[in-house]
Image (spheres, coloured by chain):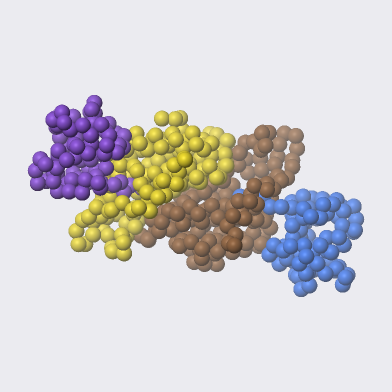
Chain colours: A brown, B blue, C yellow, D purple
């Protein structure tokens, strides 16, 4: 894994400010930092939910995210990327995922953050199950996410 | 080889991993799925729509025509819904 | 100014976590938050700098940023936007500007944050002066920023 | 009307604001710039490249052909470099 790439999968919540500061502290070559936070919403397809439970493939998830972060580091002039993905039970309003990218200029930071999120949505080995009043069900993958992920494929 | 199951594939089969020794004729992921589906009701249910199932060999996504020779760990799971 | 739009121009630094939390606390309809932080870099066009001094047009700057935030709120399905732009003397490594956007889905949050930053770079009434060992000079506007801002114009 | 100057326009003119009463023949921003540039050395320096100068009337960006009639506050400044 490239220097300045950090990937964590954990049950605990994360602290956005400290993840950003890990990419900017003690240096003066970073001009742009983009953070994306994904949160658990209180409804899914219009129906209220009680919680999400996130399952992942330990070992593969970390390795795959790191491989995509390395790809982003090569593709854009970035000074660093941090990804934190939570697993376990998460209730509405809570954080699920954090991506932080840092660069000299804003365009690289924005594009790399979108690239990482599109990847995480469509191809990282995580699965969400919804707890609703009527029972539990696995969330189905959306074609939309595959399309978003595919736009980064170089022709 | 070790097999791992995630999400509803795991729930339907009723276990998260197991060791198997498929016969020599089972050479690809697709053939492994067909062999597993014939092992019993829970497997048949998990693999009832084989095209929906995603697979990874030794932590790398593979297509169903991928060869399984030499694999240490093969995982089966539904399409991913992370992020 | 639309509800859930907050614009501040200040000399003091800002706290990213509290700005993000202002858009997400006590609600469960936000699924995506994007933050952009612009920082002062230690060099400008390859030459080391000691500091930047930011000047703005009081009254016009707040009103113009709010007008663009309102435009973003109409254009994308956003639950809120917060912008903090610092003025005065800022040294390398320090924060300059923060844009936070919140939405149900990630694409709206990303696009609106980029739209706001493109606007702030090219059209908000702020001017940067560089303090370097050889003296001070005003930073010249870059055509690149005008091009980035123009891409949001609807035809 | 009140005029405001920012960044190097302010520095060159040597003041940040002033009240002026241009003659009736000065009807547009462009004509106001020409009239100001003729007021003395510091103004001539500030407006030496009139096409570079940006203007705002009552806090709204305007082009140089904009009419100044009814304006309370007109500001002149270089291209913006915020963000």
x, y percent for residue A144: 64, 47
Side of A89 relative to D54 (left or right): right
Name the outermost residue toward the left. D40
Say which quarter of the image contains residue C115. top left
x, y percent for residue A134: 75, 34
Residue D50 position (above or below residue D75)? below
Side of B73 relative to D56 (left or right): right
Residue A1 position (above or below residue A15)? below
Residue depicted at x 70% and y 42% = A130
Side of C73 relative to D47 (left or right): right
Name the outermost residue toward the top. D70
Name the outermost residue toward the front. D25
Say which quarter of the image contains residue B73. bottom right
x, y percent for residue A77: 45, 62
Which is more toward the observer, C41 or A136? C41
x, y percent for residue A124: 64, 56
Which is more toward the observer, C3 or A56? C3
Number of numbered discs: 0
Residue depicted at x 45% and y 46% = C151
Residue depicted at x 17% and y 33% = D26
Side of A97 relative to D60 (left or right): right
Residue B1 position (above or below residue D49)? below
Q: Is residue C90 visible?
A: no
Q: Is residue D18 visible?
A: yes
Quadrant where the N terminus of chain B sits is: bottom right
Which is more toward the observer, B83 or C2? C2
Residue depicted at x 77% and y 53% = B52
């Amino acid at each position: 894994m490239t220097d300045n790439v950090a990937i964590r999968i954990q049950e605990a919540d994360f602290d956005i400010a400290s993840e950003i500061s890990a990419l900017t502290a003690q240096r003066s070559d970073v001009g742009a930092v983009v953070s994306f936070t994904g949160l658990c919403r209180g409804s899914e397809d219009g129906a209220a939910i009680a919680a999400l439970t996130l399952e992942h493939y330990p070992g593969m998830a970390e390795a795959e995210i790191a491989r995509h972060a390395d790809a982003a580091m090569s593709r854009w002039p970035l000074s660093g990327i941090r990804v934190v993905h939570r697993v376990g039970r998460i209730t509405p309003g809570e954080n699920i995922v954090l991506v932080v990218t840092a660069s000299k200029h804003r365009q690289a930071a924005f594009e790399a953050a979108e690239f990482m999120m599109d990847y995480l949505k469509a191809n990282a080995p995580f699965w969400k199950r919804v707890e609703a009043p009527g029972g539990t069900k696995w969330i189905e993958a959306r074609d939309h996410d595959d399309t978003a992920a595919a736009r980064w494929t170089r022709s | 080889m070790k097999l791992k199951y995630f999400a509803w594939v795991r729930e339907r089969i009723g276990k998260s991993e197991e060791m198997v020794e498929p016969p020599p004729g089972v050479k690809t992921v697709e053939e492994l799925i067909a062999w597993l589906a014939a092992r019993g009701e829970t497997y048949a249910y998990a693999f009832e729509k084989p095209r929906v199932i995603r697979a990874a060999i030794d932590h790398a996504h593979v297509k169903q025509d991928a060869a399984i020779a030499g694999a240490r760990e093969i995982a089966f799971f539904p399409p991913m819904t992370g992020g």
